[in-house]
Image: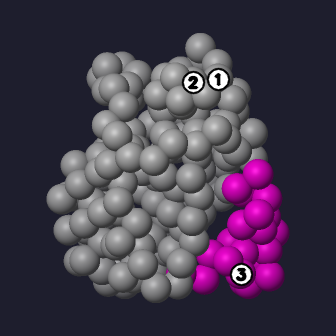
Amino acid sequence: MEGLVRDMLRILVLHGPNLNLLGHREESIYGTATLNMINASMIKLGGELGTELIIRQSNLEGELVNWIQEARRGYHGIIINPAAYTHTSIAIRDALAAVDVPTIEVHLTNIYRREEFRKHSYVSGVALAQITGFGATGYLLALRGLCEQISADGSKQFSGGGTSASGAKSDAC
């Protein structure tokens, strides 16, 4: 089983504050998809791409920073929706810069078409790319893009860390 896991891309998916309320909060802005629905669609696509996803959500900045720091051991990439921390957290930005793991920043809404304070992202300067405004589909775009980028860079080399038997193997990525 360990050989299978070593051939698989491992991606850490982090959801920031209040995203656990998706589907119930401000549906006119964030839509009706719940976080569980988003996670399920990502897991399905991850299986098709032969990519193992570790998905976590926290309302706590320090917990997100700790998970980012852990990503330097055993993860090939990070997909993060820092939510409100996008606009306030230098700590999350610095953690992403320190781990030097390819990162895609995702936002359900187009943050550049919203309130002025939401138009600045501390994360975008250290992210490989930013996907905004596509709703829940943005996460799937991020996963496909990150998987393709990692494969193109030849960075599929496993860097250690724990192992897991979840996910499915495919040559798609």
Disc 2 crowd rating (10 Å Cα; few below 14, some 14-19, many 20+) is some
- Say which residue label 3 marks: 21
Count residues near mark 3 (Cα–Cα under 10 Å), then give few for <14, some for 14-19, many for 20+. Answer: few
Which is more N-terminal, label 3 or label 1?
3
Q: Which residue is mark 1?
A: 169
Asked if the magenta segment contains residue 158, the reply would be no
Colour setup of the view? one colour
- Tell me what residue is drawn at x 60 percent, y 83 percent: 18
Q: Which residues are magenta?
A: 17-40
Q: In terms of depth relative to the viewer, which is nearer, 128 or 94?
A: 94
Looking at the rendered structure, the kind of residue marked 1 is Lys
Label 1 close to label 2 by CB (< 8 Å): yes
Please tell me which residue is depicted at 75% across the width and 47% down the height of the picture: 41
Q: Which residue is mark 2?
A: 4
* Image: 86 above or below 4: below
- Name the residue type under label 2: Leu
Residue 15 falls in image quadrant: bottom right
Secondary structure of the residue carrying tag 2 is helix
Q: Nearer the viewer, mark 3 or mark 2?
A: 2
